[in-house]
Amino acid sequence: MGSDPQYAKWPALPLAQHVFTITNPYATRPAQQAALQSLQDGINENNMAPFYKYLAHPTDGILNSTGETTSSSSSKPTGRKPSAAGMVASKSVGATLPWDEDVYNRLKAENDKELEEFQKEEDEAVEQAGETEIMAAKGKRADFFAKVGDKDKAVATYEDVFEKTGILGTKIDLVLAIIRMGLFYGDKALVKKHVARAKTLVDSGGDWDRRNRLKAYEGLHLLTVRSYNLAAPLLLDSLSTFTSYELCTYSNLVVYSVLAGSVSLKRVDFKSKVVDAPEIKAILGADGDDKLLALSGAISAGPGAEDAEMQDAKDTVSPAAPTKATTAVNLTTLGTSTDQPETEMAVDFSPLAQLVNSLYNGHYKLFFQALALVEEQFLTQDRYLHEHKSWFIREMRLRAYQQLLQSYRVVGLESMANDFGVTVDFLDRDLAKFIAGGRIPCTIDRVTGKGVIETNRPDDKNKQYQDVVKQGDQLITKLQKYGQAVRLRGSERA
């Protein structure tokens, strides 16, 4: 059993989500105002002078590029303009974070005061204590830089502590802290580098807890770089062992796991790891016998618990009525000393439940409606999902098309359009793009009648035969060229 995690509190990743919400054109005005208030509270509470300057400086701030300020005096900016990639949703800001020179000076003064205390503590440790106390003092300094949002200094100080410590568990915790700094600022290159570094450390003898925590870190990183097929197994495995609340909430992990599994897993794996997974059924809902009862005795299977009744409602036009949002229950922490954080918010999982059930059961009209709700409620509102939302929607439509067409050799275009609840022209255009890209093996004939879709099922034996013939032709061509070269050399010798 390993030691308790260290350096696991900072940076406060929800603040990065607040910055994203402020700049997100899909967010409602009340949501943007609430995010702005939470961001200001976090900056003031943690004395985040560097982060405040990064966001709100009238010249270099990523939120106030137009130069808005509430103070007549402003200092001349120094250094290059920071990159906003990975933190802001768009250049248009819905709610502005004003720059106040007096506020910045007050925050900076508090930072300087804390740094002096850390330096004093470190000097005393050097004179009177041992190496352990010196490392503890340096670790406090590193956590301080992470808390105030100074990325460069935080990473450099974490690296300094890493080089001078010999405890493997502490080394892993330090690398995970650097990964969170990269996630906070959307630095994918930094995250990729240190995820690989953390995997090497864990493989060299990391304990069970840190090995499981790394799964969630790596899965989230893979999600941000659109490797959903690699992220899905890691995120789904993390559901039963999740304790990394410094990374995201359990509700967010459920959303990430379900979306990654839905778009990337084969149907058999999708059934076993998503549709029938106990952790997901407990939250999204299932049949009556499978619903999870909360400690209070109330049903906590999630708002999708009634989705079983949708099996007889294939022709229903409107989606299921909205249900009350619930809080996800992490089964891993029940009965243990690890509690879910107070910041765990109630989430309406009904669109996810409808998406999963309608896709697996072949209720494609409900599936398209659920997909629209998932885009509106999750894909456009989360900083990790927003960047790839168009790709996700396209891949999910493709998956539904493939699932229906693989069961038929000939399908009427109008019949398929009715199944999906879309117009014939839309379906024709959408399928044409996938057919042209080689994603769906079929052809559309609209010359006669209302249109027919003919599938060209790949025959594995015929494909193998064609591959052998093709490779044989290539080999014969090479042998002929070799033979010609040999004859030419023989004639030269003669």
Image (cartoon, grey):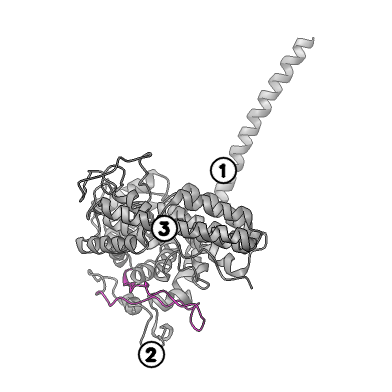
C-alpha separation, residue under disc 3 versus residue under disc 2 = 51 Å
How many angstroms separate mark 3 from mark 1 (CA)? 75 Å
Q: Secondary structure at mark 2?
A: loop
Kindly tell me whether residue 451 is visible in this rendering. no
Q: Relative to residue 60, is residue 159 drawn left or right?
A: right
Span colored in magenta: 322-351
Q: Is residue 345 a member of the stretch shown in magenta? A: yes
Query: Magenta stretch: dominant SS?
Result: loop
- Mark 1 = which residue? 466
- Quadrant in the picture for residue 256: bottom left
| Nearest the eye: 442 or 356 | 356
Residue 493 location (% of width, % of height): 79, 11
Query: Which one is closest to the eye, mark 1 or mark 2?
Result: 2
Residue located beneath label 2 in the image: 297
Around disc 1, counting alpha carbons within 10 Å, would you say few (fewer than 14), some (14 to 19), or many (20 or more)? few
On residue 113, the disc is 3
**In the picture provided, is 442 more to the left or to the right than 420?**
right
Q: Tell which circle, 3 or 1, labels the residue nearer the N-terminal end.
A: 3
